[in-house]
Image (spheres, grey):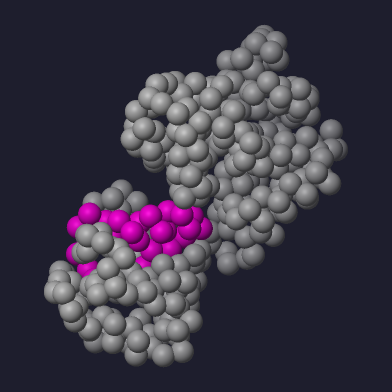
Amino acid sequence: MKIAASRIEAFLREPDVNCVLIYGPDRGLVRERARALALTVVENLNDPFRVSHLAGPAVKKDPALLADEAGALSLTGGRRVVRVEDAADGLTAAFKAYLRDNLPPVGNGGALIIAEAGELTTRSSLRRLFEQAKNAASVACYGDGADDLGRVIRQSLDGHGLSVEPDAMAYLKENLGADRLVSRTELEKLALYKGEPGTVSLEDAAACIGDSAATSLDRVVYAACGGDQRGLDLALGRVLGEGVHPVGILRAAARHLLRLHQTAGLMAKGQSADQAMRALRPPVIFFLRDPFRLQLRLWNTDRLARALDLVTEAELDCKTTGMPVDAVCGRALMRMAQAARAR
């Protein structure tokens, strides 16, 4: 069965099946949810008697490993967890055989099997198997939306006695979220930067986050919207090399286009470029104001709307068509750069 996004958190606290596929482009979120699921069974994920790790290629080579590990008894008592890492379509036959022999929803009686996978398209045989099985479940992990990311930010910083100013929260939401693990790592770095309880300001967030994930994505979207095709090619290669998923890159481009659209709309009502830019939340960082102002001359609201349609369609293609996602993302951004350059 397919777990709807609204049910995921409740399911992770009380899973009602013993075989779960967790997949998606946000590998940090895949690992975080797999960990949360495993903790419903064991208190210590490093317990060698109750937690077993299987590599996907090993299960493909010897499908019996899955049933053997699931059926093994713990020497110290209690249920066991079997984590299958790097799961892919090559494991479909092994899981199909296992689920066939464990037909009823087995609840809390046996070992909990967690298969962890990267992005799986709608044509994936492994994904279809888990979505259609009555005694298994699939959980998708895509980049955090604004609400989820806000919760992650507050949760991470609350633990260090830190609150967040509204402008700083808006900045963090805009520049994090492509990967849950990266987001948490960046927030831990921000907490260390502050050093003591207090309030995170926009200046704090920009000083700490701006030199890594944010800056890399900024280079991509500013090159695309500024018509710098060579700069886009270099920046996109770097970001992909850092492990940022194309869906996260396209969402960063969409957020930037929306900010340009909002600013252009205010200018159409009579505000100056500087007045309209100051109205944005978060405000445009000082070292990006000149290129942002330039892009306002390259794009009007109609062309921005078409560019937004382009990146939205590209994100959908990444999730549904099975085409190489790097190529889909790169093509969409290059088309934006060409449109900006033509102006």
Q: Which residues are magenta?
A: 12-37
| Residue closer to the observer: 35 or 1 | 35
* Residue 285: quarter of image: top right
Q: Is residue 207 visible?
A: yes
Give yes or no for residue 19 being in the magenta stretch.
yes
- Left or right, residue 205 beside residue 46: right
Quadrant occupied by the N terminus: bottom left
Q: Is residue 85 magenta?
A: no
Position of 98 relative to 297 (above/below) = below
* Residue that protrudes farthest toward the front in the picture: 195
Count of labels in the image: 0
Instruction: Note whether 229 is above or below 81 in the view shown.
Output: above
**Residue 52 locus on image (x, y percent):** 32, 75
- Whether residue 239 is situated above or below residue 281 in the rendered picture: below
Query: Which residue does the image show at 36% across and 32% down from the upper left?
Result: 160
Q: Residue at x 39, y 77 (%)?
A: 54
Give coordinates of residue 279: x percent, y percent.
Answer: 58, 15
Residue at the image point whose x is 33% and y is 59% from the top? 35
Q: Which image quarter is the C terminus in?
A: top right
In-front residue for pair 171/4: 171
Using the rendered image of the protein, determine whether residue 305 is visible from the camera's viewpoint.
Answer: no
In front: 309, or 283? Answer: 283
Residue 20: which quarter of the image? bottom left
Residue at (47, 50) in percent of width and height: 181
Q: Is residue 185 above or below residue 48?
A: above
User: Viewed as shown, does residue 315 lie left or right of 306?
Assistant: left
Q: Percent x, y for residue 33?
A: 35, 56
